[in-house]
Image (cartoon, helix red, strand yellow):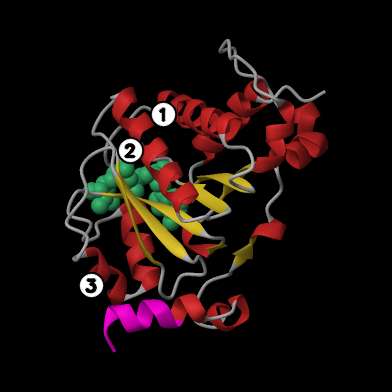
């Protein structure tokens, strides 16, 4: 079977059928709290970051989630892969996504013509619970304009493909060495700007953190971006 036939076969499957193919625990969107829900049940434990942040419309906090775990488990419309320019796999989250998706992901990626830093390209997700994978290539080191381009390029593909839910890993903060707190701020600035301008285009943007340190950083920042009482 060609990767095209396999891609279409998986896209045509129901969530229940696809879940049987995924070896790990599948996490559906209804199991992921929005920031509003998380805030209401944890507000007394949350230390605000000292950063001065311009808050956005708190209603948008219903469209954002902070979730800690393996991005390959998420049963949503698209997960974002922190890839390299070849799009042919690697370590970190890139390796995890390719391992879980199976070999056809690489076969499709090989036809995408690579990816420049700041660009994004979309593929099927194959054996992953998500419907699509959006591959982006982050900058090596602290280059905020390029990192912002990654988030914007991914969100443009979400909108162009009418996807309603997407999860971002902490792009560039692993192998590519982008300082975590600075990267989180670029991520939040980019996503909140998109949500302000396109609030009806998506239901949920998930910040998928893997490290405890990133969870603390995003928790501190999020409640400054969304001032909930
Ligand atoms: N789910 C979610 N996040 C993960 C997972 C996972 N399964 N595995 C790792 N991460 C986190 C890391 O802890 C880090 O916070 O993803 C973030 C990004 O780290 P990297 O995967 O190293 O990505 P990046 O820093 O963008 O470097 C990209 O690394 O793997 C190679 O092929 C990739 O060359 C590219 C480079």
Does residue 67 appear left or right of residue 177 in this picture?
right
Kindly give the residue lying farthest to the bottom in the view shown: 1
Ligand 1 closer than 8 Å to the CB at disc 3? no
- Residue at mark 2: C-beta within 8 A of ligand 1: yes
Residue occupied by mark 3: 107
Q: Position of residue 185 (x, y in %)?
A: 48, 25
Q: How far apart are marks 3 and 1 (CA)?
A: 31 Å
Front position among marks 3 and 1: 3
Q: Name the residue under label 1.
A: 183
Query: Above or below — where is 9 with respect to 112?
Result: below
Closer to us: mark 2 or mark 3?
Answer: 3
Is 122 placed above or below 154 here? below
Q: Earlier in the sequence, mark 2 or mark 1?
A: 2
Question: Closer to the N terminus: mark 3 or mark 1?
Answer: 3
Residue 105, x across and y down, in percent = 31, 70
The Cα–Cα distance between marks 2 and 3, rounded to whole angstroms, is 24 Å
Q: Which of 55 and 70 is in front in this view?
A: 55
User: Which residue shows up at 59% across the image and 68% down it?
Assistant: 26
Please check the rendered image and state whether residue 12 is part of the magenta-colored stretch, yes or no: no
Pointer 2 with pointer 1, Cβ within 8 A: yes
Q: How far apart are marks 2 and 1 (CA)?
A: 8 Å
Q: Are marks 3 and 1 in contact (CB under 8 Å)?
A: no
Q: Is residue 212 visible?
A: yes
Q: Which mark is residue 172?
A: 2
């Amino acid at each position: 079977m060609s990767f095209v036939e396999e891609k279409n076969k998986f896209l045509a499957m129901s969530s229940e059928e696809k879940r049987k193919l995924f070896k790990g625990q599948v996490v559906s969107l209804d199991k992921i709290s929005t920031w509003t829900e998380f805030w209401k049940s944890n507000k007394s434990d949350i230390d605000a970051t000292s950063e001065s942040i311009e808050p956005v419309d708190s209603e948008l906090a219903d469209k954002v989630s902070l979730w800690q775990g393996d991005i390959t488990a998420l049963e949503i419309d698209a997960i974002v892969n922190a890839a390299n320019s070849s799009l042919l796999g690697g370590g970190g989250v890139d390796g995890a996504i390719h391992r879980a998706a199976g070999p056809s992901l690489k076969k499709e990626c090989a036809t995408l013509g690579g990816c420049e830093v700041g660009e994004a390209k979309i593929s099927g997700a194959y054996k992953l619970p998500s419907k699509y994978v959006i591959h982006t290539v982050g900058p090596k080191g602290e280059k905020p304009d390029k990192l912002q381009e990654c988030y914007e390029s991914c969100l443009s593909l979400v909108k162009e493909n009418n996807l309603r839910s997407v999860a971002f890993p902490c792009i560039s903060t692993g192998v590519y060495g982008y300082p975590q707190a600075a990267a989180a701020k670029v991520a939040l600035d980019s996503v909140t700007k998109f949500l302000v301008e396109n609030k009806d285009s998506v239901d949920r943007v998930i910040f998928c953190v893997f490290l405890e340190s990133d969870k603390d950083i995003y928790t501190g920042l999020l409640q400054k971006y969304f001032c909930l009482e």
